[in-house]
Image: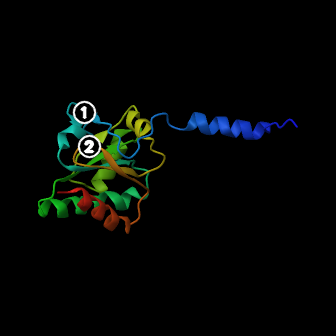
Amino acid sequence: MHHTIPVCILILIVFIVLSAPANSAKIGDSYPITLPSLFDSKKNISSNDFKEKVLYVDFWASWCIPCRKSLPQLNELRERLKRNGKDFEILAINLDSDPNEAIAFLNKYPVDYPVVYDAEGKYPKLYGVKGMPTSYILDLQGKIRYVHSGFRSSDIKKIEALVHEMLP
């Protein structure tokens, strides 16, 4: 007996395969990031600047509703860990089409950690970001150890626990 795949299912399969990021980041991968500072486009900031620290890489945008909670809570987490002498940093990667929208957002929700701007959208493709915010926790060697999508206020405790697990 001859079986054929219905055309609509075949089209769906092709769409899924073609829309999947070719190089989605996976646990254990290492993709160094170098981008210009949001506030000084002549100054590049690299994830390599934070070697020997646990690094929380946060992809965000000004239109992201959960980012209104995540950025300030991450800032508090960073300050708490730094006060306790922990080797932890956050690198926020803004994905707005207009950097002025990101700057206006940060005037309302200020942070003390480095913020870079990805004008070309290179890194969300490389990392396989599917929604806002999406974050990656990198260990002391710069390897991805955890991927976190979305944000709820209750997430900060889990994030802090994961960071503590990676710290010496």
Horizontal and vertical percent for residue 18? Answer: 59, 33
- In the picture, the quarter occupied by the N terminus is top right
- Can residue 72 be seen in this snapshot? yes
Residue 79 lies left or right of residue 146; in this view the side is: left
- Secondary element under disc 1, as helix, strand or loop, is loop
Horizontal and vertical percent for residue 5? Answer: 78, 38
Could you say which is closer to the camera, residue 76 or residue 81?
81
How far is the residue under mark 2 from the one under mark 1? 24 Å
Residue 85 lies left or right of residue 138; in this view the side is: left
The label on residue 159 is none
Q: Amino acid at mark 2?
A: Gly
- Crowd band around label 2 with a 10 angstrom C-alpha radius: few (<14), some (14–19), many (20+): many
- Secondary element under disc 2, as helix, strand or loop, is loop
The reply to whether discs 2 and 1 touch (Cβ–Cβ < 8 Å) is: no
Horizontal and vertical percent for residue 83? Answer: 12, 63
In the figure, residue 126 lies in which quadrant? Answer: top left
The label on residue 41 is 1
Residue at x 17%, y 46% (from the top left corner): 52
Horizontal and vertical percent for residue 131? Answer: 47, 49
Residue 64 lies left or right of residue 87; in this view the side is: right
- Mark nearer the viewer, 2 or 1: 2
The label on residue 142 is 2
